[in-house]
Amino acid sequence: MSIQLCRVAVAGDDASASYCSDDKYFKGDHDLKASIKAVLGGLLEKTTASADSDIESKMQHPADNPRVYGAAFCEKSPTEACAHCLRVAKKQLLRGCDHTAGAEFYSELCYLRFEIYNFLN
């Protein structure tokens, strides 16, 4: 399996990067795509709902197949900046990685990841 790298800008000088699996095996799997979208949306909502400036959220969806695991993290940033960063991350991952086994986005403000394998501890 190979990894593909895409660079995007989040806000101002905040450099960011996203990585997604180059494995096209899941292309056309609409159930997987729906699970990925649900996990990323749920993580955005759960993470930005907290007033804490240093928050991490983890979740899985659904209880059966195709199960998708996800994590989000905002590092000491205001709620609005965290929400903006995670919205950009979600959009980036859904645009290019919604048919893969996993992907991640990171910047100085936030981190967003999903996998079909359980990486949550």
Image (tube, rainbow, N blue to C red):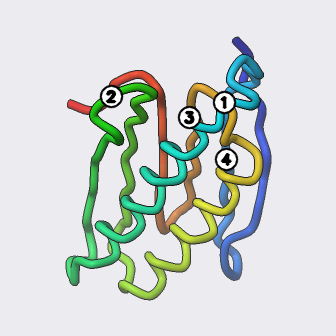
Q: Nearer the viewer, mark 4 or mark 2?
A: 2
Q: Position of residue 92 (x, y in %)?
A: 70, 57
- Occupied quadrant, residue 27: top right
- What's the amino acid at mark 1? Asp
* Residue 51 located left or right of residue 80: left
Q: CA distance from mark 4 to mark 2?
A: 27 Å
- Kindly state the secondary structure of the residue where label 1 is placed: loop
Q: State how far apart marks 4 and 1 are (Cα).
A: 22 Å
Q: CA distance from mark 1 to mark 3?
A: 5 Å
Task: Please tell me which residue is depicted at 70% across the width and 76% down the height of the picture.
Answer: 13
Distance Cα–Cα, label 2 vs label 1? 15 Å
State the mark number for residue 29. 1
- Give the label, 3 or 4, closer to the camera: 3
Q: Residue at x 74, y 68 (%)?
A: 9
Nearer to us of marks 4 and 1 is: 1
Horizontally, is 33 left or right of 118 in the view? right
Decide: is 111 above or below 48. above
Disc 3, SS: helix
* Callouts 1 and 3 close, C-beta under 8 Å: yes
Residue ID at (52%, 63%): 108
Neighbourhood count class around disc 3 (C-alpha, 10 Å): few under 14, some 14–19, many 20 upward = many
Q: Amino acid at mark 3?
A: Leu
Q: Are marks 2 and 3 in contact (CB under 8 Å)?
A: no
Report the label total: 4
Q: Which mark is residue 18?
A: 4
Identify the secondary structure beneath mark 2. loop
Label of residue 32 in the image: 3
Query: Residue 102's spot in the image, x, y percent?
Result: 56, 31
Residue type marked 4: Ser
Q: Amino acid at mark 2?
A: Asp
Q: Which residue is mark 2?
A: 64
